[in-house]
Image (cartoon, rainbow, N blue to C red):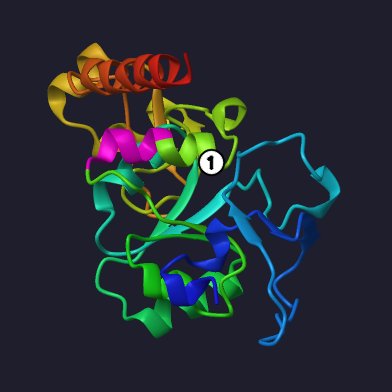
Amino acid sequence: MIESCGVPHPEVDLILVNGQPVDFYHTLRADVDVDVDVYPVGFLPTLFTNKRLQITHFTKFLADGHLGRLSRNLRLLGLDVAYLNAAEDRQLLEVMQRENRALLTRDRRLLMHAVVQNGYYPRSQYATEQTIEVIRRFDLLRSIAPFTRCLRCNAPLEKVGKAEIIEKLKPLTKIYYEEFRRCSGCGQIYWPGSHFSKLQKRIAELHAQFSKSAA
C-alpha cells in the first residue's frame, strides 16, 4: 500500500499502525479502520529505536547511469561507489545483490523492486547537493578519506615509488613531482598536479555545504 502511493520501501524507516510499530509484512484488514503513519529515515530517531526498518550506516554503493557526477564526488571522498553508465535495470539489480551494495537512483520504480534492501532516492538534481544527501542519509562523514580511490574505476589507490613508474611519466612530471599513487585496479597514476588544488577546493566546498546544511 505504501509503494502504491509512490514511496519506495527503502525510504521507509518506521511504520505505525494505530500508534504501534509494524514491519513490511503486516497485513491491513479491509473491514477495520486504522491509522497508518509512515516515517522516513532520520525522523524522530529516538522513537521505537528497536523497530526501525532501515540500516542507517552503509559504505558500499551502486549508482545508476544518471548519477555519474555524484559517483565521482563520492569516489573523490574515498567512498566505494560502483557506477554502471549504460546498464539495464536487471544488470543493476544483479550487481547490487552480488556485491551487497546500496542502490542510488532517481528512478523510484527501480527502488521498489523486492530485491532492493538498501537504497536511496536523491531529491536534488545537482551533484553537490546529492552528495550531501547521501553522506547524511548513510552517516558517512567519518568514512570520508579523500584521494584514496580511483575516480575512473573505483578501486583503492596505493602509494608507489617514483622509480617504479618513472617511465610512464611525462618529462615535466618527472621533474616537479615526487609523490605518486597508483590505482590497484586499472593502473591509473595520480599525483598532486595542477588539478589537485581544484579537487581540494571541491572537497572544501562539500564540507562547507554539509556543515551549512547540518546547522
Query: In the picture shown, does residue 66 fall above or below 91?
Result: above
Nearer to the camera, 90 or 185 = 90
Identify the residue at horizontal 53%, vertical 29% (top origin): 144
Q: How many labels does the image show?
A: 1
Left of 67 or right of it: where is 47? right
Query: In the picture shown, does residue 123 fall above or below 8?
Result: above
Left of 20 or right of it: where is 212? left
Q: Which amino acid does label 1 sit on?
A: Arg
Start-end of magenta stretch: 126-132
Q: Where is residue 71 in the image (x, y as percent from the top left)?
A: 35, 48
Label 1 residue SS: helix
Main SS of the magenta segment? helix
Please give the residue where the numbered disc 1 appears in the rendered image: 137
Identify the residue at horizontal 81%, vertical 43% (top origin): 49
Left of 120 or right of it: where is 31? right
Q: Where is residue 41 in the image (x, y as percent from the top left)?
A: 60, 46
Name the residue at the right extreme: 50
Q: Does the magenta stretch include residue 187?
A: no
Nearer to the camera, 40 or 199 = 40
Q: Where is residue 81 in the image (x, y as percent from the top left)?
A: 45, 51
Nearer to the camera, 151 or 205 = 205
Identify the residue at horizontal 26%, vertical 52% (top origin): 68
Q: In which quarter of the image is the N terminus?
A: bottom right
Query: In the picture shown, does residue 45 fall above or below 51?
Result: above
Q: Is residue 131 magenta?
A: yes
Identify the residue at horizontal 39%, vertical 26% (top origin): 180
Left of 69 or right of it: where is 160? right
Q: Where is residue 78 in the image (x, y as percent from the top left)?
A: 48, 35
